[in-house]
Image (tube, grey):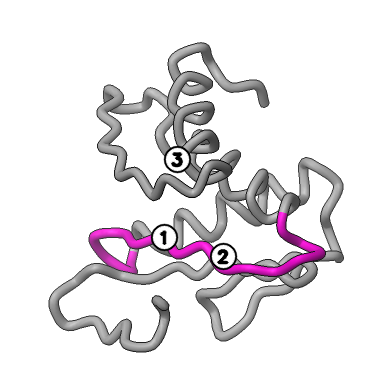
């Protein structure tokens, strides 16, 4: 699936920040059913593939584990399959997707969640 122009604009800005080590924070507002989750999955795949040899972690927080985090994990797995990575990535502990040495760690931002130790 190709990203729409407004999704590409966000993806380019995020990747520019990452590649230049700027550490910018982005707030993205896209209408309901406008492709926010698809955009996120594409960025996650891009980062996982760029860092699969070198290694690294990306951390994604959702407002709740169920259903939002689960939906994000499933979307990423579907897109990894679509891009030919079926059987190559691994799901760990139910909330980490690993491709080579790179990991996408999915966390809940709920007040009752324990996310200690996942950031550096």
Mark 2 to mark 1 CA distance (whole Å): 7 Å
Q: Position of residue 45 (x, y in %)?
A: 66, 48
Q: Earlier in the sequence, mark 2 or mark 3?
A: 3
Q: Does the residue at mark 2 contact the one at mark 1 (Cβ under 8 Å)?
A: yes
Is disc 1 placed on a helix, strand or loop?
strand
Residues in magenta? 51-66
- Which residue bears the numbered disc 1? 60
In the depicted view, which residue is nearer to us: 17 or 35?
A: 17
Q: Is residue 77 magenta?
A: no
- Tell me the element at label 2: strand
* Whole-percent x, y for residue 93 in the image: 56, 85
Secondary structure beneath disc 3?
helix
Q: Position of residue 64 (x, y in %)?
A: 26, 65
Give the label, 2 or 3, closer to the camera. Answer: 2
Pointer 1 with pointer 3, Cβ within 8 A: no
- Above or below residue 42? Residue 67 is below
Q: Which mark is residue 104?
A: 2
Q: Residue at x 25, y 28 (%)?
A: 29
Residue 117, by quadrant, is bottom left
Which residue occupies the foreground of this view, 110 or 59? 59
83 relative to 60, above or below:
above
In screen coordinates, is 84 left or right of 3? Answer: right
Q: Residues within 10 Å of mark 3 (few under 14, many from 20)?
A: some
Residue at point 74% right, 65% down?
99
Q: Is residue 63 above or below residue 15?
A: below
According to the picture, the residue beneath numbered tag 3 turns out to be 37
């Amino acid at each position: 699936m190709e990203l729409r122009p407004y999704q590409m604009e966000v993806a380019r800005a995020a990747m520019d920040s990452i590649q230049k080590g700027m550490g910018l924070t982005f707030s993205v507002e896209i209408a309901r059913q406008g492709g926010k989750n698809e955009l996120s999955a594409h960025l996650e795949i891009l980062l996982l593939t760029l860092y699969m040899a070198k290694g690294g972690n990306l951390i994604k927080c959702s407002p709740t584990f169920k259903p939002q985090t689960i939906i994000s994990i499933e979307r990423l797995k579907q897109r990894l399959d679509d891009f030919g990575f079926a059987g190559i990535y691994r799901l760990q502990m139910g909330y980490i997707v690993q491709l080579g040495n790179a990991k996408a760690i999915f966390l809940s931002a709920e007040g009752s969640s324990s996310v200690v130790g996942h950031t550096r």
